[in-house]
Amino acid sequence: MIKYFKGSIIVTIIGLITAYFYSEHQLCDSGLKTLFIVFILSVLEVSLSFDNAVVNAVKLEHMTPKWQHRFMTWGILIAVFGMRLLFPIIIVSTFAQIKILETAKMALYDVDKYTHYLHQTHSSILAFGGVFLMMLFLHYMFNENKKIHWIKPLEDKLSNFGQIEGLETCICVLMIYIMQHFQPITHRLPVIISSLCGLVLYLLVHGLSELMQKKTQGRFEGAINTSFKAGLISFIYLELLDASFSLDGVLGAFAISKDLIIIMIGLAIGAMFVRSLTIMLVEKQTLKQYVYLEHGAHWAIGTLALIMMISTKVVISEVVTGLLGLIFITLALISSIIYNKQQENKEAEKDKTKILSE
């Protein structure tokens, strides 16, 4: 197991050393206090993204080893600097109508002002992530081809709704309308725009991903070129998914530390561990061994999406979000172990009956 986390451990050591000396020499603050803050930020990132690792593993199983490697190298850089640093800066710049370079300078040198603008636009940020994740959750639950159900009475009924094409989109549009209704008048348009961006991006990337999967199955010509495109689309899909998961954590991080460098180090360590966990789940085929784990992850995603939408109006602690996700994953894992034991008992009973009949 340790081999999967070697890279994460190296990044952690480098990150902690950097944070310590940065704190001692640049911030003139206690290095040990900063190390504790980095640790808390890392735990926050992992707790909010554990279900993300499970969903990533599902997608990575269909990607080539080359693209899996790119996800662990290029992907981690994009995740830390692109999604957790640049993405919020772009959103603040767009909705606060400040030039992007000025916003970046503000984030580095005037963190209090940047944090103010970040929280001014937090409704738009959470609306984007909430709608994107809700589409993911509903698409999974409305899948009529899903054979195994965890919460059977409910999931069985939900899968039947998959016969109604575009239902998940209609539900999300209705949720956008309800969400913007509870916003102040000045925030309504930004919330609607960011929500629709999340909706359109999901439909676009998911649609392209399915199209490329069909092409790589040999239904079309140019399989090699198509394989590259399929890998690229899946890579983009995973990065957008990661962005949606990270938004809640980025906002919560500023409540723990005001220094952008320290926040980036903490979130980078957490993100690296999540990536390593994802690769471990793929290579050990954990999702095949524990059949309900994917279901639990999607229920956690649905809960997170709903919390993000509610958080556009009411503040909900990241601790609550992380704990709920962990509860769903844990219950799904326990259910999977019980299921496996029942299957083993059934097989043993069949063998026993067969021996007695002979």
Image (cartoon, rainbow, N blue to C red):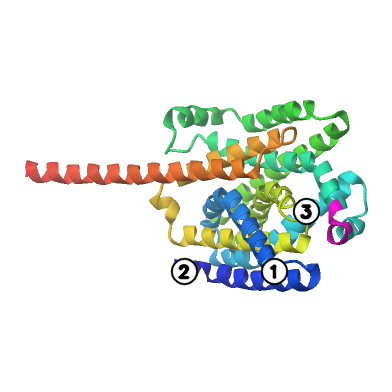
Give the magenta range.
Answer: 106-112
* Residue 110 part of the magenta segment: yes
Q: Position of residue 280 (x, y in %)?
A: 48, 61
User: Around disc 3, counting alpha carbons within 10 Å, would you say few (fewer than 14), some (14 to 19), or many (20 or more)?
Assistant: some
Which picture quadrant has residue 267?
A: bottom right
Three-letter code for the amino acid on which mark 3 is drawn: Phe
The answer to whether the residue labelled 2 contacts the one labelled 1, judged by CB atoms less than 8 Å apart, is no
Per the model, the C-alpha gap separating discs 2 and 1 is 28 Å
Q: Residue at x 90, y 59 (%)?
A: 101
Work out whether residue 192 can be spotted.
yes
Which of discs 3 and 1 lies nearer the camera? The answer is 1
**Among numbered discs 2 and 3, the one appearing first in the sequence:** 2
Left or right, residue 107 beside residue 317: right
* Residue on which the image places disc 3: 87
Three-letter code for the amino acid on which mark 2 is drawn: Ile
Three-letter code for the amino acid on which mark 1 is drawn: Gly
Q: Position of residue 272 (x, y in %)?
A: 60, 63
**Among numbered discs 3 and 1, the one appearing first in the sequence:** 1
User: Around disc 2, counting alpha carbons within 10 Å, would you say few (fewer than 14), some (14 to 19), or many (20 or more)?
Assistant: few
Task: Give the tally of numbered discs.
Answer: 3
Q: Residue at x 70, y 43 (%)?
A: 129
Which picture quadrant has residue 176?
A: top right
Q: Residue at x 60, y 40 (%)?
A: 320
Per the model, the C-alpha gap separating discs 2 and 3 is 32 Å
The answer to whether the residue labelled 2 contacts the one labelled 3, judged by CB atoms less than 8 Å apart, is no
* Residue on which the image places disc 1: 31
Which picture quadrant has residue 221?
A: bottom right
SS class of the residue under badge 2?
helix
